[in-house]
Amino acid sequence: MFRYILKRILIFIPTLLVISLVIFMLGVYAPGDPVANLMTVTSGGENMDDKKAGEEAYIKKWKELGMDLPVFYFTISSQADCDTLYKIHRKAHRETLAALTEQHGNWNEVDRYYKRLQKFENTVLDFVPDSVSTKSWGRLRDNTGNLYYQSKSSTIENTFSKLDRYVSKINDSLNVIQPAFAALKNDYNNISATATTWKNYVPSFNWYGLNNRYHKWITRFARFDFGISYQDRKPIAKKIGDNIFWTMLISIISIILTYILAVPLGVFSAIKKGTTADSITTTFLFILYSLPNFWIATLLIIFLCNPQYLHWFPAFGVGTEAAEGKSFFAALGIRIHHLILPLFCWTYGSLAFLSRQMRGGMLGILRQDYIRTARAKGLPENKVIWKHAFRNSLLPVITIFANIFPLMISGSVVIEVIFTIPGMGRMLVDAMVAQDFPVVFTIVMMVAALTMIGYLIADILYAFVDPRITYSSKK
Amino acid sequence: MLFKKKKQEQANEGELPQSYWSYVKRQFRKNKRALYSMYLIIFLAFIALFADFIANDKPLMCKYEGSTYFPVFREYGVKTGLMNWQEEFLMAEWYELEYDWAVWPPIPYKNTTIDYMNAPFVGPFDKQDIKSARWRHLLGTNKLGNDVMACMIHGTRIAFLVGIVSMGIAFVIGVLLGAMAGFFGDDQLKMSRGRILMNLIAIPLSIFYFGVFFGKSLILALLAFLAVFAIANLLGKLFDFIPFFKDKVNVPMDIIITRFIEVVVSVPVLILVLSVVAVFPPSIFLVMGVIGLVRWTGIARFIRAELLRVRSLEYVEAAYALGYPRWRILLKHAIPNALAPVFIAVAFGIAAAILIESFLSFLGFGIPIELNTWGQLLTQSRQAPEAWWLAIFPGFAIFITVTLFNLIGEGLTDAIDPRLKQ
C-alpha cells in the first residue's frame, strides 16, 4: 500500500511539472507585453529626457518582474538565433529582431543594425530643429520609432524612402543626421548582403543554468510564495484566501447534498428495476445529466431573478451588503436566499452522475451469487438489500467523491461567473481577461494539485473500504 | 423503408451475416433510442454541411439584368480563390439589387448579416420591420440585428466542426499511442541500443524542426517531425558495428505509454483548455487542436485494452505463423478488430467537445465573437433578459446535440460490449 502511494506521488510530480511548464510557456508566449501593461508612465516621448525617463521606468519594472533572465534552463534554437536575446528589454523589439534573424540568419549584423538604429534615434531626438524643419523632424522621429516594429524588408525599405525625404528636408547645418542615416542604411543593407539563411536549419543547444525565470517561479511556488497579482498588486495568497471561501462552501454543501439525494435515488431505481418508476427516474436522471449547467443557470437567472418574469431570487452576488448589520438568523436567511440557485446548478449534474453510478453498482451487486444465497436462506428482502447489497455497492460510490471534488471546482467557473459569486472560478476568468498571469498560474496549479490529491484519496479510500483490493503486485 | 427491406432479405436468406461488425450493427439497431438519435444526428449533420444553402444572405439562384447567376455556389469558388465575383456583384448589396427573379435560401440571412431595422432584440412574435412574411426573423434577432435562426444553423456547423475535428485529432493520437502500448505490451518491442539512443536524440531535434517549419506550413512541419525520426532510426542501424550498441534491449512500451496517459488524465481539462484559449487571439482551430490534444486518453485506453486482448487471439498468432511483418499484423488485423469500442469513446468525446466549445463561447473565449455560435447567443441573453428567445433556443440546441451524441454512445456501448452495460 505504502509503495503504491509512493508510486502515485511519483507520477504526480511529473504531471504537475508538465502542467506548470505548459501554463508558464503560455504566459511567456502570450501576445501583449506585460511590462508595458503595468506601466503607469508611457515611455517614448517628444524628446530625449522623456524617452530616457520612460525607458528607465520600463527597465526598472522589467527587472522587478524578473524578466531580465532567460526563460528556461535551456533552449533549442538555430545557429542563426541569438542566445542572449532575453537581455533586450522591450518585448516588441525582441520580436522584431527575432523575425529579422529568421529572415536573414545573421544575428551579428542584425544586432549591429539594432544598435545603429538606437544611436540614430538618439541623434534624431538630440537634434534641435529650426522653425522651418520642425514638422519634418517630427515625422522623422515617428518613422524612426516605427522601424523598431518592422521586420518585413518591403516595409522597412518603404520607411527608409520616407526617412530619406524627411532627412533631406531638415536644415542640418551641423551635418549630424545625414551621416548617421547613411550609416543606418548601410547597416541594414549589410544584413541582407551577408545573409546566411542556412543557419536557420542548424540546431544549437544553449544552456542557461538555474538562474532563469521558470526556475525562480517554480521554486518560489514550491515554497507557497505565489507572488503578486498584476491587477491590484495584492499578494496572490491573500487574494485566493479571500475568494476560496465561497467556492469551498458551495462545493462542500453541494457534495453533501449530492450524496444525501443520489444514494437513495440510485438504490430505489435499482431495486425497482424495470418498473415505470425506475424508467421515469432513469430518463429524468439522464436528461439532468446532459443538461449543460450554464444553460440552466442562464434560464434560472433570467426567468426566476427578473422583475420581467418572476422575481423570486436575487440575481447577483452572495448578499454581503444585504446581510450586513442583520441578526444572525436574518443574515443566514439572506445568504441562503442568494445561494439556492447557484447550489442547484452546482449540484444537479453530479447528482445525476452519482445516482446513475449508484444504480449501476447496485444492479451489479444484486446479480451476485451471495445475494441469491441470502434470498435463498429466507432473509427478508429489506435485509438483503440494506445489509448485503447496499453496503457493498456503496463502496465504489464513496470513492467517487474524490473525483467529483476537483470537477466541481472547475465546473464552478461558469456558475460563479453567471451568479457573480466572488469565488475562485470567477477570479480565474477575471485574471484571464486581464492577462494577470501570476493569478492564472496559481489557480491552475492549485486545481491540478487538488485533482491529483483527489485521485490519490480515491485510490486509498478504495483500498481501505474494500479489503480485497491490494495495490502491491504479487507475482 | 430501406432498412425494413434489408431485414426481409436477411430473413429470406435464412441466416444473418456473422461478421463482428454486422453483429454490432444489428445490436445497435435493436436499441430504438440510440437508432433515432443516430437519425437525428445525421439530420443535424446535414444542416451543418449545407448551412450555406439553408441560411445565406445571397440568393441561391437569380436572374439579374438578363443573365442567371448562382451566387451561393459562386461564393465557394471565391472563398477557395478559384473564382472572382462577377463585375456587377463586386460591391453588391444583395438585398438591394433589382432581380428579375431570385430564389432565396429558406432563411434569407446569414449568421453575420446585420439587420439594422430589426435591432436590438426583436422577438419572434414581435412586430418586425420587414418587406413580407418571407423575410421574417423566425427566431427573432439579437442586439446587433443578427437573425437568430441563421445563427443557430451556422452554429450547428461550428459545433459539429469542433466536435468532429477535435475528436479526429484525439482519434489519431489515441489510436497511435494506444495501439503501440497494447500491441507491444511490455515485452514485445526489442530495439538495439543504438536505435534507442538515436531516437532519444531525435526528440529535441524533431521539436526544433517542427518549430522551424511551423511558420511556413503545418503539413511541412509534421513531415519534418516524422522525417527526423525516420532518419534517426536509419542512422541507428549504423551503430550496429559496435557490439554494445547492437545489443537488443526490451522497451517497455506499455509502461511508458500508460504512465504518459496517467499524466494527461490528471490534467484538469476544462481549466487547461480555458487558459490556453484565453491567452491567444480567438481561433476555432486553436480550440479544436487543444481539445484534441487533451481528450485522447479515453480512446488510447480503450484500444490498449482491446489490443492486449486481441494480441493473444488465434488469428493474430496465425498471422505471425504465416510470417507477416509485425506492422502489417498491427495495421491490417489487430487495429481494425480493436476499433469497435473506440467508437464509444469517440461518440462521448464529440459530445464533450461540443459542450466545451459552447462553454468557451459562453465565457467569450476562443471562438471569434462575430460567428454568433450557440454559446455566444446564450451569453448575449444575459445582458437582455427580455430576449427570452436568446436564452431558450441556443441552449436547447446544445442540450439536444450533446444528449443525442451521449445516447449514441450508450447505444454503442450496449451493442459492442454488453458487459459494460450498467
Image: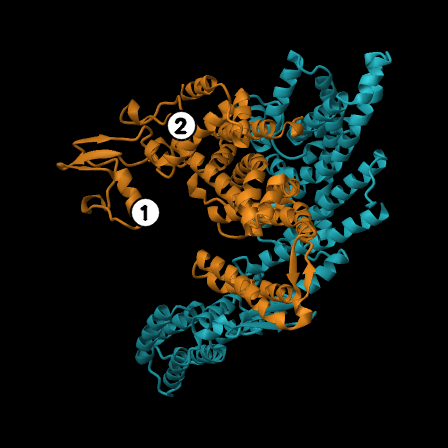
- With B150 as the anchor, is B192 left or right in this view? right
- SS label for mark 2: loop
- With A303 as the anchor, is A406 left or right in this view? right
* Rendering colour (chain B): orange
Q: Quadrant of residue A276?
A: top right
Classify mark 1: residues with Cα within 10 Å, few (<14), some (14-19) or many (20+). Answer: few
Q: Position of residue A34 (x, y in %)?
A: 57, 60
Q: Position of residue B399 (x, y in %)?
A: 53, 29
Identify the mark at residue B79; answer none if there is no mark: 1
Residue labelled with disc 2: B140
- With B68 as the anchor, is A465 left or right in this view? right
Are labels 1 and 2 on one chain?
yes
Residue at left offset 51%, top offset 45%: B288
Q: CA distance from mark 1 to mark 2?
A: 29 Å
| Number of marks present in the image shown | 2
User: Between residues A402 and A253, which one lies in front from this camera angle?
Assistant: A402
* Rendering colour (chain A): cyan
Quarter holding the N terminus of chain A is top right
| Residue type of the residue flagged with mark 2 | Gly
Q: Is residue A452 above or below residue B99?
A: below
